[in-house]
Amino acid sequence: MLSAKLDLKDRKNFTVISDKQSGLVKAIQTVIPETEHRQCSRHIMDNWKRNNHDMELQRLFWKIARSYTVGEFNGYMLELKNYNPSAYESLLKTNPRSWSRAFFKIGSCCNDNLNNLSESFNRTIRQARRKPLLEMLEDIRRQCMVRNAKRYIVVGRLKTRITKRAHAEIGKNIAGAQACERWMWQMTRIPCAHVASVIIGKKEKVEDYVVD
């Protein structure tokens, strides 16, 4: 039903991020099997090192989760194996292909491996959820309308085609402040340092290459 309401069509370029609820995993595999299903890396890490407070493990985990290439992923996994073999073996069982950027599909223009968006939404509607169903839905509808109206005002004030955040990312990449990963541009669709250099060399605007 949700798939039809959202008009997902071929569903190949859509991404779903969840906390690995068994019911949701099965539903996605059944109803929208072409959609990429990612797991929230923060929940993976919390469960993985639940009884271990070693900060080095946490540092290595985020290196692994934020790797953009398989080579980089394998390098950090080897570092973890050398540091703590048992932690390495247990992490392999979490299906890293579902939460490390090294294995994400190209086309969704999204490199998220956290479900912060849904958690933020849940906090926003916390008061509304205490009300009866119809009143709750009305409160959520009004909150969404207010948020959309505020965003409309912000967009109306923009002098450029893309957001300030995208401009800031482009600025870092043009300055070479951020190391380029092989798949970063393909995944986020914001030009990396190498792509920005080529675009500038062609005397074109970097922001014109940001996907809408």
Image (cartoon, rainbow, N blue to C red):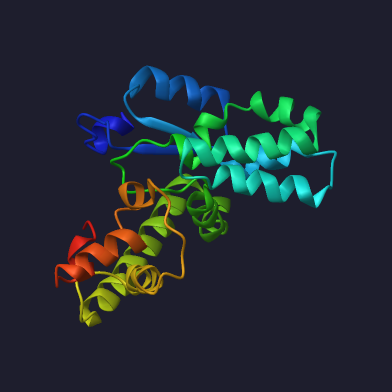
> Seen in the image, is 22 located left or right of residue 50?
left
- For the residue pair 25 and 176, the one nearer the viewer reads as 176
Identity of the residue furthest to the front in this view: 201
Residue at horizontal 77 percent and vertical 39 percent from the top: 49
Identity of the residue furthest to the left in this view: 203
Residue 86, quarter of the rendered image:
top right
- For the residue pair 54 and 205, the one nearer the viewer reads as 205
Figure quadrant of the N terminus: top left
Residue 16, quarter of the rendered image:
top left
137 over 203 or under it: above or below = above
Residue at horizontal 72 percent and vertical 30 percent from the top: 88
Image location of residue 77, percent across then percent down: 64, 35
Image location of residue 199, percent across then percent down: 20, 65
- For the residue pair 92 and 12, the one nearer the viewer reads as 92
Figure quadrant of the C terminus: bottom left
> Can residue 191 be spotted in the picture?
no
Residue at horizontal 37 percent and vertical 46 percent from the top: 183
